[in-house]
Image (spheres, grey):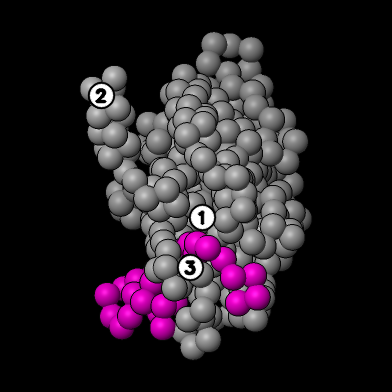
Amino acid sequence: MLREKRKTILVSLGLAACLTIGLAGLTASADEGAGAVSITDMKGREITLEQPAERIVALTASDCEILYAIGAGDKLVGRGTYCNYPEEVLEVPEVNSGDEMNIEEVIALDPDVLLMSDMAQTEEQVQMLEDAGIRVVVSDAKDIEGVYTAIGMIGALMGQDEKAAEIVDGMKDTFAELSEKSTGDGTQTVYFEVSPLEYGLWTAGANTFMDEIATMLGVKNCFADVDGWGEISEEQVLERNPDFIVTITMYYGEGPTPTEEILSRAGWENVTAVKNQKILNLQNDELSRPAPRLADGAKLLYDFIYGETEEESEAASEVTLAEK
């Protein structure tokens, strides 16, 4: 019945009419039977499904990653434009989001749930989707704790609670291990470049997962006085003279690499990170996306800062034990 009503909506839906259609009866209702799922999304909205979601559209790249990580990638029937990991997600139909969102396009995919970030869509768009029987769930992690919450919430939504808990525990173990063996005392600084000079410099400041991971590893974010993601000047970077630079600029195989571009910047030759060639290019979103791979990004940053791989560290430990 629900799918037939959705088809009717697709035929008759027009932008002006959408705002006035009364279809409240199509929204999912709670069921006391086995398999019912109840969650609180990251906007504080109570969501109840009669059973774990079988068809889902995810508009943000991090949520797509979480779905695949918990073993629910096969339930994904639509993805946002920037969802690009893992590689198989590219085979899933792409949908627009935000102001360019096409309601008919989403409804045509016949999802049980649409996952979106806070304020990614207008209230009118959300209402239209829910009137069509699609439950809208807000997933909007802004820090590591938020990532844990998002993973747990999506795990419950998909009936994959145990796998979600396993992933969260693994992330916590990795972060604890890296923190314990990090020897930095916060005197060395790192500059996170999330937008290159060509397009205007932006960085990750306080209250971001990049800042959290820097602190975890015993280094100081040299733009910790910036709240969230902020635009900065070239002069500010030169003045703060970071010991390490992390860039997330993509490289497409032409011209200088992101690392080479930074090394060749006029006036940057006296920056400590440039002089020592301590520039890390993480172009696969390991540190820039609130998803399980943040743990991988933390490992890569640890290796970069402390100059050893996990294998080298284990080898050194074995030598020490042998000497004893």
Disc 3 or disc 1, which is closer to the eye?
3
> Given the image, on which type of amino acid does mark 3 rest?
Ala
Q: Is residue 47 left or right of residue 11?
A: right
| Residue 117 visible here | no
| Residue 33 visible here | yes
Dot 1: within a 10 Å radius of its alpha carbon, few (fewer than 14), some, or many (20 or more) residues?
Answer: many
Residue drawn at x 45%, y 52% is: 305
Q: Who is closer to the viewer here, 114 or 185?
A: 185
**Residue 323 badge:** 2
Q: Who is closer to the viewer here, 324 or 206?
A: 324
Mark found first going from the N terminus, 2 or 3: 3
Residue drawn at x 32%, y 43% is: 309
> Given the image, on which type of amino acid does mark 2 rest?
Glu
**Residue 288 badge:** 1
**Residue 273 badge:** 3
Dot 2: within a 10 Å radius of its alpha carbon, few (fewer than 14), some, or many (20 or more) residues?
Answer: few
Residue drawn at x 54%, y 11% is: 34
Q: Is residue 185 above or below residue 171?
A: below
What distance separates the C-alpha of mark 2 from that of mark 3? 36 Å
Q: Is residue 29 above or below residue 267?
A: above
Tell me if residue 25 is in the magenta stretch: no
Task: Give the position of the C terminus as an image quadrant.
Answer: top left
